[in-house]
Amino acid sequence: MLRIVNLEEMQDMLLRIPGLVDMQEQRDTDFIPDVKQWLSKLEKTLENNRLPSAGNIAALRAMLISAERGVIPAGVEFHGRATGRKIRDAAAAFVLRLAGDIVSNAIQKDSARVADAERMTRQLVALAKAKGLIREIPSGENFTDMLKAIWKALSADTDIAPGTINVEGLLGPHDTLIILDRTITSDMQKE
């Protein structure tokens, strides 16, 4: 189970793909080195989170390195003559697509789990506000203590307690406070 901070780090890595594709479209000379650097960072991120897909990303990086040396990767086709640049660009685009799929699949269950917890927390916060359990956005030096106190109050309320058990079961105690903070902040600022 990934923590929220780690999940968001991987989601941020996926959000860099459009920028890399833009570089390819503009025929930027840094496209290939930037893709390799991105793959290395992605591999390290996955490795730090002990996800076996780090090995798949390393294999894709090896495929790109081989393409730089003139080897046409399996599954890559060309129209016209296969020049060195075409091979490298096609391999990099192929690798980006595969890496994106690998990471998306690796984090899919955790993303769904966090989304479920966010939805439940939004409902709990709405109910807690209606019952007067939440009156202000936590802030200041005692920020974490305030969040813990709010969560404790929600957990003690007989109507809300079952929901808090579900959320904490999905996220764990630390990530629960993160989602609680985000929900209170976004909902109460809209008022």
Image (cartoon, rainbow, N blue to C red):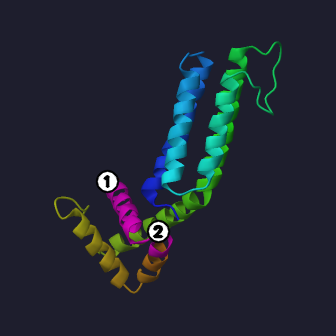
Q: Can residue 100 be seen here? A: no
The residue drawn where x is 21% and y is 59% is 139
Q: Residue at x 33, y 74 (%)?
A: 151
Q: Main secondary structure of the magenta part?
A: helix
The residue at 39%/87% (across/down) is 158
166 sits left or right of 24 in the view? left
Residue 131 higher or lower than 66, as above or below: below
Q: Position of residue 162 (x, y in %)?
A: 46, 82
Position of 31 compared to 9: left or right? right
- Viewer-proximal residue among 178 and 65: 65
Name of the residue lying farthest toward the left: 141
Q: Quadrant of residue 159?
A: bottom left
Question: Circle 1 sits on which residue?
Answer: 189
Circle nearer the N terminus (2, 1): 2
- Highlighted range, magenta: 168-189
Relative depth, front residue between 47 and 124: 47
Residue 54 magenta-highlighted: no
- Local secondary structure at mark 1: helix
Q: Residue at 49% across / 48% down in the picture?
A: 45
Instruction: Report the residue marked by disc 2.
Output: 171
Q: Looking at the image, can residue 2 be seen? A: yes
Q: Which is more toward the observer, 29 or 144?
A: 29
Residue type of the residue flagged with mark 2:
Leu
Q: Measured from the top left, where is residue 18 in percent x and y?
A: 57, 31
